[in-house]
Amino acid sequence: MSERKNPFFEPYKTPHDTVPFDRIRMEDYEEAFMEGIRRDEEYLDKTINNPAKPTFDNTIINKEDDEGYYDLLDRVSTVFFNMLSAETNDEMDALAQKLSPILTKHANDMRLNEKLFERVKYVHLHHRKLTHEEKRLLDDCYQGFVRSGALLNAEGKERLRQLTEEASLLGLQFSQNLLKENKAYRLVITDPAQLDGLPQTAIDAAAEEAKAPEAPPSSPVGDTNVLKSNEAPSGAVGGAISGAVGGASAASWVFTLDAPSYSPFMTYSTQRELRRQMYMAYNTKGIHDNENNNIEICKRLINLRREIAQLLGYKTYADYVLSRRMAKNVRNVYRLLNQLVDAYKPTAEKELEELEKAALSSTNARKFSRKSNEAPSGAVGGALEPWDLAFYSHKLKLKKYNIDAEMLRPYFQLEKVIGGVFGLANRLYGITFKENKDIPVYHPDVKAYEVFDRDGSYLAVFYADFHPRKGKQGGAWMTEYQGQFVDRKGVNIRPHVSVVMNLTKPTPERPALLTLGEVETFLHEFGHALHGIFSNCRFESLSGTNVLWDFVELPSQFMENFAIEKKFLQTFAFHYETGEPLPDELIRRIVRSRNFMVATACLRQVSFGLLDMAYYTKSEPFDEDIIRFEKEAWKKAIIRPQRMDTCMTTQFSHIMAGGYAAGYYSYKWAEVLDADAFAVFKRHGVFDEKTAQRFRDCILSRGSTDEPMTLYKNFKGSEPTIDALLKRNGIRKTK
């Protein structure tokens, strides 16, 4: 019997050279990481000791000169860190902690190597005639070295090493703490009366969750005084309720902080005290007095990034980040955020005033103080609390538009939605998707598809991972297992892209039925996927979604526009039991209700952008009270009184552990672009193939081979304005 080989060390021999998830073992990762580092060091030694004069070919792109070369470190890193988000476990978390300083040190060894930088610098100043894409790569490479500290003196480089290694480790710890907090909380209900108001889909999902293996014991999440099982909260009917991890009896229902569980509970439950518990559990993640507390981690990350930026010659971390963004500088970001506040705040104030009046009218309840134990179940009285907003927003929307997420859910069966989304891509771009069960996947929830172009040629592999589970981070994202590039033989290596979501799971009673919001999430991540699928660039580092961060959300947010288009809905929205199409009247209600509470939602996003900028425009050491700083930072976009016992910062992965530090404004920046771009489609017809082809050719296939504004103007013919967004949201009336 032959000795088993580490699958990362040899050709995968799978369809399209896809990752052999079924053959990878935990012990393979560390071995492959260490060998990958060794190979990188060998490459570095070979490059810096090359006696030939530095050229673009022997210094910038020489890494794949050897026959059969592949970047082992990139190969194993891609799989490992994708799994760390989508399918982690305690052993993988521990390995990540162990590897983090090693990998950061290695990256620094490459970027801070003086001999290597001298060669890159020489090529930057003296090079052969280059194509436009080659110039982009050379400039990115040179700037990458400079922004990584190549111009620092020895003392500065050593300090930068210390700062980046610590920041890398803390970012990882932040994410692990957040995942533990999220998975630890279980609201256990044993009295059916406490399910009042909840749709059957939520009840069935909670019953299934009660049968699932429990999370490991940890400190309670939510209230500091968790209800004991024999204590009923004020306003509750009775029964066992626990805000801590605990056993679920045979006749019980378990609600978690995962979106498909949390969102319906907050929207439909009439049990105000239980909504409060869920809200407080969700919005206090990372601030409890336990081992998962993220407060000091956040402070340290803010200071580490500030010091890194100042070491590199910038006043603040935001200045450092924005120098390589479409926005260019802090002033332009604040200009956008302030424009949005000024435009949307008056409408948001009216929205919340209407909501409070409707809530008071619907309850006809006596007034009560902010102590929830003085309020009857479901009552509002004098003031709406945050845990009331979703509940009464739903009631008001139902009253005004006679539309409700549960009305639509039977028409959004996941399998049909998949077909609808794929069909949309076919209608726009002529591409097709075919499931291939021979492609290995890392979990039974994951489906793998081959993507074919209009002419039938192979285009990409597409993975879709749909449902929440214990080892999976919350939220939704797109990633790659292989980027697109053209190899030295001229072969166009096609991408393997993946979308990871946390959509409603199926139950024994019914298939996975989505909300319209979940359909929009699918479309959003699918837009990112198309950006990767259509990539047609020479160099991988410029391909696909490797674009400036305030441009990357354009393709994704653009796709969300189709969610309420009648002709799109008519292709897949059929009742899962009767087969009846989604009635035209419901579609009309969807369109009419599109801008319900839109200004409030906009200000919420703007508030996150303001918070992000407040942290990363600090030029002095940060040691303030995180909660108080947070409430002050975003108050311009806040209308209602703020609670001082909740915190967003300690669970704000985008700006603490993700790539959006000093960049969260990107969502609103890209929303201006997507509204402007979709207006072009609306003028020519939302399914117009010529417009779609131009969008593909000018934006989706070009990666970062040109400046984003150049790409956009190539598509539209002019720069975007905020007008289309204001008109779409009903803030500025169309003539």
Image (spheres, rainbow, N blue to C red):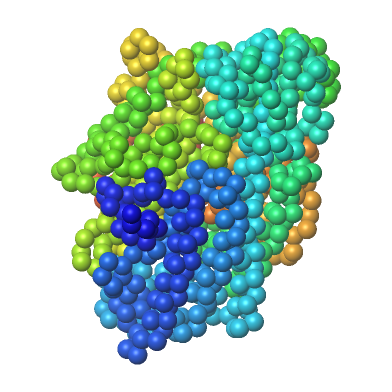
Q: Is residue 640 above or below residue 322?
A: above
Residue 278: where, in percent of width, then height? Answer: 69, 28
Identify the residue at image location x=58%, y=80%. Answer: 152
- How many marks can you see? 0
Identify the residue at image location x=21%, y=46%. Answer: 458
Residue 63: where, in percent of width, then height? Answer: 34, 72
In the image, 321: left or right of 673? right
Is residue 508 at all visible to an observer of this figure? yes
Closer to the camera in the image, 601 or 32: 32
Closer to the camera in the image, 547 or 594: 547
Identify the residue at image location x=46%, y=50%. Answer: 25
In the image, 141: left or right of 109? left
Q: Is residue 297 above or below residue 375?
A: below
Residue 615: where, in percent of width, then height? Answer: 67, 55
Picture quadrant where residue 400 is located: top right
In the image, 148: left or right of 656? left
Residue 726: where, in percent of width, then height? Answer: 48, 37
Q: Is residue 13 above or below residue 284?
A: below
Is residue 336 at all visible to an observer of this figure? no
Tell which residue pokes out farthest to the front in this image.
1
Q: Is residue 311 above or below residue 619?
A: below
